[in-house]
Image (tube, rainbow, N blue to C red):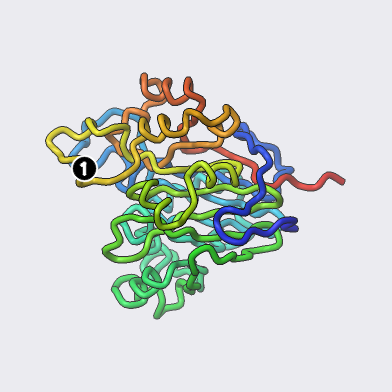
Amino acid sequence: MIAKRFAGALTMGAALLGNAPADAPPNCDVEIVVLGAGQDAGAPQIGNAGDDGPHLLPSSLGVIDREGSARYLFDATPAITQQLAMLDGVELPAAGLGVDGVFLTHAHIGHYLGLAFLGFEAANADSVPVYAMPRMADFLRSNAPWSQLVAYDNIAITEMADQALIPVSDSFAVSPILMPHRDELSETVGFAILGGLNAALYVPDLDSWDEWEESSGATLEQLIANVDIAFIDATFWDDNELDGRDMSAIPHPRVAATMDRLQHLSASERAKVHFIHYNHTNPIRDPGSAESREVSARGFNVARRGDRHCLAAAEQP
């Protein structure tokens, strides 16, 4: 059972949560699996077939609710087929497709295109719950091919509200947190995910932590303090990453700057941070790079596909 509720983004449980080994034991009621850690287009990207760097899938989290015999996706990426197969390797679904709900952050390609594979031409799914903010929900209902998913009852949309608690099951709950980002088609949110007394944060995309702080009245440090693991935007390493591009026109928190900002935190607080959603040009893509080693040396983490984290341990008999 959920032993502690939270109201909004900053009142969640704060027991230290660790990185589970790849062969995490089955005595975990709610487990988070990193299904992808790359930017929307993954890697290699179109036009870069010769890219021999580590293969990236777009950022997505899978949540396994063992007590409820259910599985959930946070973002439906273009690699949804491969990512669900990866989740099968951790825990086979109780029945059907093994998608008992999808939580969408926003309407950029790496975060919702996977919904198409639930449609008539593919899985022809039956009313998969899709949780979306109001503009995102309206976008899906009003634009093909997404509107066909609604018309054919392949998906069933539930609208969310900023910081409103969604009790998904007896095992875990979710709360969306509005984030500043390019919102041409929809709002952008991150998610607080609560399991038992523990909480996780998933914010793959935003323009600026300063802008979020101004609008929310909270700080990044407070946000991290009130969760146990934080998956946060790592699209670019620094401002020198894209040759020939004005990077001021592509606002995202830079990994190097985020570490500088949080370096004053205790080692246990820094260890909560897991950088996710990194571009194919970001050197932390390579686990052996100097930049990846710097992240580790400074007490932070880089999220990698296949990482597993136990959010709520099973009660012992």
Quarter of the image holding residue 122? bottom left
Residue furthest right in the image: 317
Q: What residue sits right under mark 1 in the picture?
A: 248
In this orientation, which residue lies closer to the viewer: 187 or 40? 187
In this orientation, which residue lies closer to the viewer: 253 or 287? 253
State the residue at coordinates (53%, 63%). Answer: 163
Percent from the top left, x then y, of residue 221?
51, 41
Residue furthest left in the image: 244
Q: Is residue 264 above or below residue 59?
A: above
Quarter of the image holding residue 165? bottom right
Percent from the top left, x then y, of residue 285?
36, 31
State the residue at coordinates (43%, 52%). Answer: 81
Question: Horizontally, is 26 left or right of 51 in the view?
Answer: right
* Residue 94 visible within the image: yes
In this orientation, which residue lies closer to the viewer: 9 or 97? 9
Q: Amino acid at mark 1?
A: Ser
Quarter of the image holding residue 290? top left
Percent from the top left, x then y, of residue 44?
28, 38
Q: Is residue 18 above or below residue 197?
A: above
Percent from the top left, x then y, of residue 291?
37, 23
State the residue at coordinates (38%, 39%). Answer: 234
